[in-house]
Image (tube, rainbow, N blue to C red):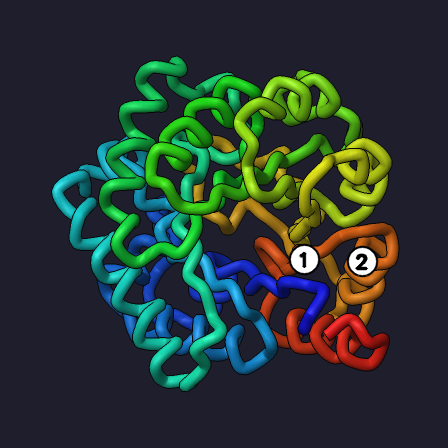
Amino acid sequence: MSNITLLDGGMGQELLRRSSRAVTPMWSADIMLNEPTLVRDLHREFIDSGARVITLNTYTATPQRLKRENQLAQLAQLHQRAMNAAQEAIDLADCNEVKIAGCLPPLVASYRPEVSLSFEDSLATYRRLVELQSRASDLFICETMSSITEARAACTAAIESGKPVWLAFTVSDDHPEQLRSGESLKDALLALESFNTQATLLNCSQPEAISGCWSLLSKQKGPFGAYANGFVSVESLYPGDTVETLEMRQDLSPQQYAEHAMSWVRNGASIIGGCCEIGPQHIKALHSRLCSEGFI
């Protein structure tokens, strides 16, 4: 029996590289509407690379983001297509060990908690997303949570589903002991402790930042882990921007990323994977290291 749960990597950046379409502020939601087979095939590649949890491609399909692009009417269709693509990928891979994670992301913009909604408004939207995704999801990941309020709202809605819930905070790359809101990671972990989520994670931060606050994460009672991004910086990204403002690191090859992730495994992580700019080759290299070192 494996001691490690291996997640997939980032969908958005990889899909945009594979698409023939112009980049839009809708990011991967545009691909989901217009080139759903790209999504299915990328899920399949992650599964073939060793991932046993794949996340629905609904990160940018929130009512707030879609309304900004005059696409709110596409909300239900986007979620249905995402669920179809994930299940089709599992069927094609012929791997019944794979679980589908529902995605509860920042509703307005990543890394910018100052534009987030109130707790009440966030909770209402997260409940709507849970309802849309629940029938295809084995668990929910509240991911890239930048503030305590955002995390509380997402977790509340996810727990109401009755399914397992994983909570993933994103920390400041320059001050990894803090969320991107400026709130301390220690306070955030304490504030969400009573929710009794099934796992606590860090995601969509640089791997060095994740390592920099590992001592705090590793004090969690239940399973914990991480999935980092491969961005040089996220400081240039604002609500409504396209991903063309973001630059991929050139010093984070599959082998280099695996080295970071294996250090987390050796220090207690039981759930690992990748986020933005971490593709199937990264997950494949990480899977190979896990196998060679006896973790899988």
Q: Is residue 239 visible?
A: no
- The residue at which mark 1 appears reads as 272
Q: Which residue is at 49% across, 74% downward?
A: 97
Q: Which residue is at 22% across, 33% downward?
A: 67
Q: Quadrant of the C terminus?
A: bottom right
Quarter-wise, where is residue 157 in the image?
top left
Q: Amino acid at mark 1?
A: Ile
- Tell me residue 108's x, y (percent): 39, 30
Q: Nearer the viewer, residue 75 or 14?
A: 75
Question: In the displayed structure, does residue 158 sit left or right of residue 223?
Answer: left
Are dots 1 and 2 in contact, CB under 8 Å?
A: yes
Q: Quadrant of the N terminus?
A: bottom right
Q: Earlier in the sequence, mark 1 or mark 2?
A: 2
Question: In the displayed structure, does residue 103 sit left or right of residue 4?
Answer: left
Question: In the displayed structure, does residue 15 sit left or right of residue 87?
Answer: right
Quarter-wise, where is residue 234 in the image?
top right
Count numbered badges in the picture.
Answer: 2
SS label for mark 2: helix
Position of 58 relative to 51 (above/below): above
- Tell me residue 138's x, y (percent): 40, 56
- Tell me residue 100's x, y (percent): 41, 61
Q: Nearer the viewer, residue 233 or 274?
A: 274
- The residue at which mark 2 appears reads as 265
Q: Which residue is at 56% across, 20% downward?
A: 148
